[in-house]
């Protein structure tokens, strides 16, 4: 059973992308002719920012914060970061700039840049569960543990050989706690365990009910398996979805790398 659960998680991770999906990203102004009618929703790691060996090593390239601030102004505030990171972590990365955000895979949301979290949808993970999950980091010196309170992430970019052992260990814990309301999120060299009942998609749906996002056409760009839930709901909102790095199922196109996303966003501000 342990191996079956681990294999299911890995299979899900590997099949969320489709090489037959569209691979064309239109010219920015053909795609977004009216910024005053658009809501720009952006994942961070692997989308806006290049992935690094550890989460703490990511950095904001010169010009990106200015681009995001100008787009926020041009959209009358309808720009939000949609991330698995906590609000506090997002603010540390982009300091001194502050942006509206759906954080923690939908666990937190901030609707105004001058406010704290407007909504927190997730209780902290059970302490005993976190203790058992944290012990998985001992499988290899390269596994990094990140405790977000409402979730716990095991990063193994420095120990890729440990991937299957990590998922097997998580599956064993889940088998011991079949009624525990938890969900496993496979990502790029990360296995994250969070409370079930909220996702990036649920956070985006809630965000789009509020001003200045309400009534606008959403444009979402993401790169990872955790962004698939948002890709899936874009048609319901007459929105557009683009993946980064690989061609995800159900998207309108894709970017090759975060640098291409940053260039695309900058070009949205150029009327030429």
Image: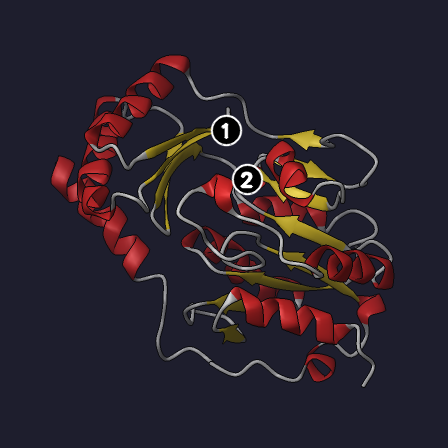
- Indicate which disc, 1 or 2, sits on the residue closer to the N terminus: 2
Q: Residues within 10 Å of mark 1 (few under 14, many from 20)?
A: some
Q: Nearer the viewer, residue 198 or 75?
A: 75
Q: What residue is at 50 percent from the left and 21 percent from the top?
A: 124
Asked if marks 1 and 2 touch (Cβ < 8 Å), the reply is: yes
For this view, does 253 lie left or right of residue 271?
A: left
Q: Nearer the viewer, residue 254 or 89?
A: 89
Residue furthest to the top in view is: 128
Give x and y (percent) for residue 54.
42, 42
Question: As displayed, is residue 220 above or below residue 8?
Answer: below
Q: What residue is at 36 percent from the left and 66 percent from the top?
A: 17
Q: From the image, tell me which residue sits under label 2.
A: 85
Give x and y (percent) for residue 153.
40, 35
Q: Quadrant of residue 100?
A: top right
Residue 215 visible within the image: no
Q: From the image, tell me which residue sits under label 1.
A: 148
């Amino acid at each position: 059973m342990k191996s079956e659960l681990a294999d299911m998680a890995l299979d899900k991770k590997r099949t969320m992308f489709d090489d037959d999906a569209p691979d064309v990203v239109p010219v920015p102004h053909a795609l977004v002719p009216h910024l005053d009618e658009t809501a720009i929703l952006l994942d961070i790691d692997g989308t806006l920012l290049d992935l690094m060996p550890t989460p703490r090593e990511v950095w904001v390239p010169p010009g990106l914060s200015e681009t995001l601030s100008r787009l926020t102004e041009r959209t009358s505030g309808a720009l939000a970061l949609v991330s698995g990171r906590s609000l506090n972590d997002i603010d540390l990365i982009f300091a001194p700039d502050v942006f509206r955000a759906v954080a923690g895979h939908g666990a937190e949301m901030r609707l105004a840049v001058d406010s704290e979290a407007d909504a927190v949808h997730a209780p902290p993970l059970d302490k005993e569960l976190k203790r058992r999950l944290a012990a998985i980091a001992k499988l290899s010196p390269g596994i990094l543990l990140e405790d977000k309170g409402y979730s716990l992430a095991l990063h193994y970019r420095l120990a890729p050989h440990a991937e299957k052992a990590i998922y097997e260990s998580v599956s064993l814990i889940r088998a011991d706690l079949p009624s525990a309301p938890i969900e496993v999120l496979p990502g790029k060299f990360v296995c994250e365990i969070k409370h079930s009942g909220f996702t990036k998609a649920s956070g985006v749906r809630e965000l789009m009910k509020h001003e200045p996002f309400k009534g606008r056409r959403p444009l979402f760009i993401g790169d990872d398996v955790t962004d698939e839930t948002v890709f899936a709901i874009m048609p319901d909102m007459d929105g557009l979805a683009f993946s980064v790095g690989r061609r995800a199922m159900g998207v309108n196109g894709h970017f090759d790398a975060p640098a291409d996303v940053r260039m695309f966003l900058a070009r949205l501000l150029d009327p030429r």
